[in-house]
Image: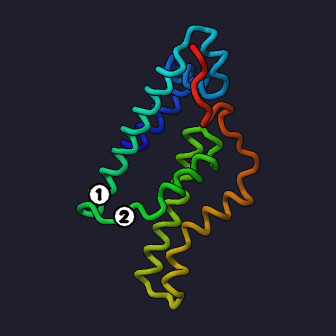
Amino acid sequence: MAILLVALWHFGFGRTRFGLRLRAVGEHPQAAASLGISVARVRWKALLLSGALAGLGGAWLALDNHGFTAEMSGGRGYIALAAVIMGKWRPLQAACACLLFGFAETCQLHLQAADVGVPTELVRAIPYLLTMAALCGFIGRSRAPAALGKPNVEE
């Protein structure tokens, strides 16, 4: 389902009316508003869609842990944000970054089970160390949407 959602979003982000409007609202809301696009409506739709996808992710995490436990996300939101930045705000590249970070998580779990003589705290830090290394030196320039975090324009 995740692969299908990434492929659909990659297509939808650049080729559908909603995707193009979302990009326009994210980059230059005043220009989008001058074309008659309701900036607030597009942002609300994007917020609801992202909330639904985050809810699916949380449901999967709870099912994978066989129930809800405190601190079960354990910093994965930080890693997800790093994946978006590393993917330069594009769906396919962000999905590839998620696969890299998932591989680091899997390596961490296997090293914990193998008991290789390395302190557990260091082994648990592998995904976070990889995230910091990727953000510090290997991604190049990543530019966020120009209007990210700015309030709506007057319509």
Q: Which residue appears at 49% of the width and 71% of the height? A: 107
Q: Which residue appears at 39% of the width and 40% of the height? A: 53
Q: Is residue 65 left or right of residue 23?
A: left
Q: Which residue appears at 43% of the width and 73% of the height? A: 109
Q: How many marks?
A: 2
- Judging depth in this view, the residue of 7 and 128 nearest the camera is 128
**Outermost residue, front direction?**
154
Q: Quadrant of the N terminus?
A: top left
Q: Is residue 130 left or right of residue 19?
A: right
Q: Which residue is mark 2?
A: 72
**Residue 84: % across, % down:** 58, 46
Image disc number at residue 90 = none
Q: Is residue 140 left or right of residue 112?
A: right
**Residue 73: % across, % down:** 40, 60
Examine the image and state in which quarter residue 3 appears: top left
Q: Quadrant of the C terminus?
A: top right
The answer to whether marks 2 and 1 mark residues whose Cβ atoms lie closer than 8 Å is: yes
Image disc number at residue 62 = 1
**Outermost residue, left direction?**
66
CA distance separating discs 2 and 1:
8 Å
- Judging depth in this view, the residue of 64 and 1 nearest the camera is 64
**Outermost residue, bottom direction?**
117
**Residue 20: % across, % down:** 57, 21
Amino acid on which disc 1 is placed: Ala
Amino acid on which disc 2 is placed: Met
**Residue 22: % across, % down:** 55, 25
Q: How is the image coloured?
A: rainbow
Q: Secondary structure at mark 2?
A: loop
Q: Which callout, 2 or 1, points at the residue further toward the start of the chain?
A: 1
Q: Which residue appears at 24% of the width and 61% of the height? A: 67
Does residue 9 lie above or below 56 as drawn? above
